[in-house]
Image (cartoon, helix red, strand yellow):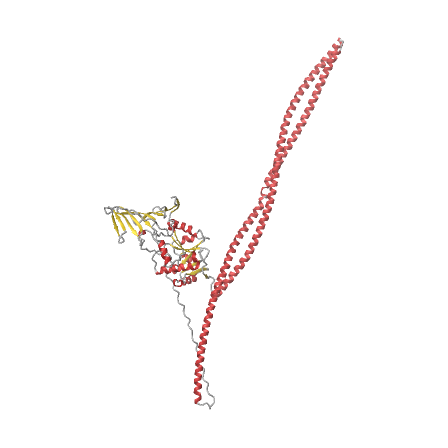
Amino acid sequence: MKMFNKKRRDKNEDYRNHSERATATSTVAAQKPKPKATQSSTTPNVRSSAGVRPTSSSVTASTSAPVKGQNRVNQRRATQTAAKNSVAIEREMADLNKQYQTLRGELKVQLVQDRKHEKQQYETLVAEQLNLEQQLKDAKVTLSKQDKVVNTNDSERQGMVKTINAAQKRYDDAKKALAKSDQTIKSLEKKITQSEQSLADLKQNEADMRKAIQGEQDLKKLFVLMKQQEKQAQDLYQKSDAINSELVKLQKREQTETRERSRKEHAITSAEKDLHTAQDALVAYDRKKKSAQDEQERSLNLINQKINRLQHDYDQNATIVKGLQQKIESIDAKLKSDYGTTHLVSPVEFDQSAKYFLFSTDLIQSLSGDEKASMEMIMGLLKSEVKDKANVITVNYNDSLPEIWNSYQSAGLVDKRTGLYNMYYTIQAKVPGAVAKTKPELPDNPAWQYKRNADKQIVSIADDGGNPIMTLKYRKNGAIWYMTYFNGSLATRRDVYDAAGFLSVTQYLDRTNNSQVTLENFYRPDHSLAMVKQYGSKSIQLVNKEEAITNVFHSEAQLLNWWLASVLQQQNSVLVMGVNAPLFDQCLQATNDNFHLLPIVSADDLDNQHVQDIINGKSKLSSLVVTDRDVQTAIEKQMTRDLEITVMPAAEVRA
């Protein structure tokens, strides 16, 4: 269905002949319901009953005539009764056949719904099964890694033990060295004591000799005694010097050994400290390892419990999936045997929690009969299916959109509760029902030339030399539509006012080709700049009220995609659009859990690639709205998958 994409010019479109605006309605005519063929009845041939031949010769001719007449009456009555019975039987058979076909159709719908329900359950469980399978794999990988967590650092402990053994050896060696030093010092002390005792004995001998000399009164004896003691004294002095020398050496060696002992004591302290540090590290390591082992054991228990639970759920799901698969196969077999196919059509299930948006590039004022009928068909479908959740969304600039929308509502084409969204009205922050309080001011110069129309409205202004300054175009209600400004004979700028009287757009024209716009400024009702389009550099800039640039786009398509996403992807939305609409590809790519696409298909679209992909199961779309039963029949003959198809109600039926 070619919805809202046929190009045409509105009578008030000449100021924007550089742009291509699309119409807002379909070219598909309202579908009239075909009259049903009446069912003919065939009157059965009724045999005439033969008359009874009289057997008695006594029966006279006068009595045989009434008998023959009565037989003919009975014959006619029997024929009429048989005919009535035949018609009644045919009528009853037709009713029974109708009931059978109705029940057969209801059974088909029920089978389709059952299979759809089972398939939904099946697909959900298969997805859960895949998730469970992945969780099982992850849990088993975690389990295998947990087995290696504690046992991978045994070499570290062995290093610690080596460190302790080395520290213990240093400590033991230091203690042995200290003990040896103590023995040496003891031996030295003993030798010093002995030397000191020998020296003391010598001194005592010397003292005794002196005492003997001092006590001898006889000179002769004294002289002899002195002679004897002189030699002894010399020996005594020699021994004393030797003992003193040895004593000094022993004392120096003792001092050296004492200092060495202090160093060895320090070595013992250091070795002991290193030993305790290494032992503490090993104790801490063992404690940590024990804690890790305990934690690992707990983790392993939890992981094993998780694996067991996942395996149980996986096996249980597998059983359910197998059962659902058997049910689906059974339903498929039933459908194949009774209806000759397993690919069936069911009506589109409209999501009552979603907002529905009918896509149109633009809306136009004057609609043909076919366009009105198409509008009635699609809006009638949305109204019957989603009631007040239907909306219309347009993307072209149209400063007469409120007037057109009001005319649609007055004509009953759209419900008053139907919402209208337009990209430019959103960007320009226009308020429905707001009207400009002031009118555009025109220059007033007595020397200039003012040309007026039949309504005495100024349509052009020229200077005193006849050179154009500006021209004006008016709406049917007398309001200024746009004003074109000239520089010499060249049009350079155009100010466009919307239907509410607000300055909406300023267009700057190419000096070499006035039909080309080089730049457009779009304004909000408060005159602040909202958007700038530069056609030369292909740049589109959105501007906030603080005059800061918020977004930059390099094509119209980028702007449209951004705006559609901002409107449609903020809530659960369904976009209803013709399969051949200009933005269908981009919208199809943008679909997600919150944004869905419902294509409209007409007879002209059956060869469309998107339609073929849907029919053959190559598209993620599986729901269609078609313009008539013939389109649905054509799709049913080609489809290789289950589809949801809803036929638009004909305009006359809805009316």
Residue 579 vertical placement versus 226 (above, below): below
Q: Among all residues in the image, which is located at the extreme bottom?
A: 58
Q: Among all residues in the image, which is located at the extreme left?
A: 465
Res. 62 image quadrant: bottom left
Res. 221 image quadrant: top right
Q: Quadrant of the N terminus?
A: bottom left
Residue 11, image x, y percentages: 31, 55
Residue 207, image x, y percentages: 72, 15
Residue 66 vertical placement versus 282 (above, below): below
* Camera-nearest residue between 279 and 464: 464
Residue 581, image x, y percentages: 38, 55
Q: Residue at x 45, y 78 (%)?
A: 81
Can residue 47 be seen at all in this image of the molecule? no
Q: Quadrant of the C terminus?
A: bottom left
Can residue 68 be seen at all in this image of the molecule? yes
Res. 388 image quadrant: bottom left
* Camera-nearest residue between 271 and 292: 292
Q: Among all residues in the image, which is located at the extreme top?
A: 219
Residue 215 vertical placement versus 189 (above, below): above
* Camera-nearest residue between 98 and 385: 385
* Camera-nearest residue between 192 and 101: 101
Q: Residue at x 71, y 20 (%)?
A: 197
607 left or right of 328?
left
Residue 381, image x, y percentages: 42, 60
